[in-house]
Image (cartoon, rainbow, N blue to C red):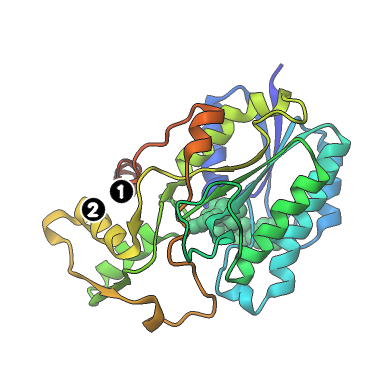
Amino acid sequence: MTLKILQFGTTGQLATELLRQAPDHEVALTALGRADADLADPAACARKVMEARPDLVVIAAAYTAVDLAETEQALARAVNAGSPGAIAQAADAVAAAVVNISTDYVFDGAGGAPYAEDAATNPLNTYGATKLEGEAAVAAANARSLNIRTSWVVSPHGKNFVKTMLRVAAAGNPLKVVDDQSGRPTSAADLAGFILSQAPRLAAAKAGDPAFGVVHFANAGEVTWRDFAVEIFRQALGDQAPEVGGQKTADYKTPATRPLRATMDLGKLQQVYGVTPRPWQDALAEIVAALKA
Ligand SMILES: NC(=O)c1ccc[n+]([C@@H]2O[C@H](COP(=O)([O-])OP(=O)(O)OC[C@H]3O[C@@H](n4cnc5c(N)ncnc54)[C@H](OP(=O)(O)O)[C@@H]3O)[C@@H](O)[C@H]2O)c1
């Protein structure tokens, strides 16, 4: 029987990739955008789950404006924690499993990276704190839930670092990029592929199955934002690649504090799901090709 997936989000990077790839899988995917289900309204989102009675719910939308979250704390909390909790509870009521997406920003990045799934969390900003609350709310409401922590998500769609760097370079201005924060870039396409390929297992698995809980998903490798920019320009612009200067986080003031090295360990991904993510450079090449096409 075709698996029924209810997805929250239609326009974001991950949501776009899930919608693009769903036809390649044995799933019937219904996606709700902001106009159908506003994540600022947990009760309304829960009702959508009760009405749809899916096999699996995927929460692919979130409040992702990391700096703005410092001034819109209540909204960020409702979207990133209130609604995921309510959605997971409704999913439990209709015997649906749930996938929620979280972030490496649950870690303070002050030491101990690469962090395993059970490493101590200590978010430095409101976005990370609300995502961590969302993880807890989802896990408490539904024993058949998976919180996937990801990092530095990039794709040919929406807003992301790859597109920002290419836009800034096209404007011809001198470039300085933070060189003391490092992490793992993640292709939204690879994350979407992982979710869709695991969907049958998650929809069928019973509470207590190792597929549920928390898992880290990112592309393999680790890089600073500056060196990520250098590789983006090397791949996209070749000989025309601009010079990229370095900058310290301490000299680049933003409303939200960011972890210096929240790099996640990817061992569980291999052990529990048998998945070895490809290097971030390979994923980037696909994105650059799509942007050029
Ligand atoms: N981007 C990253 O680098 C990154 C890193 C770590 C974890 N994550 C997590 O990965 C997941 C996917 O991120 P992404 O990069 O695909 O996000 P994204 O491209 O920033 O898109 C966010 C999506 O959330 C939707 N949204 C925001 N507020 C909403 C609301 N009140 N009601 C309904 N929809 C709302 C937006 O809809 P509109 O188009 O209507 O605004 C948009 O579709 C999120 O859980 C995010 O926290 C992302």
- At a point 33% along the width and 61% down the height, the residue shown is 224
Q: Residues within 10 Å of mark 1 (few under 14, many from 20)?
A: many
Report x, y in % for residue 289. Answer: 29, 44
- Residue 12, can we see it? no
Residue 288's tag is: 1
Which quadrant does ligand 1 occupy?
bottom right
Q: Earlier in the sequence, mark 1 or mark 2?
A: 2
- Residue 68, can we see it? yes
- At a point 30% along the width and 62% down the height, the residue shown is 166
Which element is circle 2 on? helix
In the displayed structure, 119 sits above or below 107; it is: above
Report x, y in % for residue 75. Answer: 72, 69
| Left or right, residue 167 beside residue 4 | left
Residue projecting furthest to the front: 112
Report x, y in % for residue 196. Answer: 58, 31
Q: Quarter of the image holding residue 90?
A: top right
Instruction: Give, as a three-letter code, the residue at label 2.
Output: Ala
Q: Quadrant of the C terminus?
A: top left
Residue at disc 1, CB closer than 8 Å to ligand 1 = no
| Left or right, residue 216 beside residue 288 | right
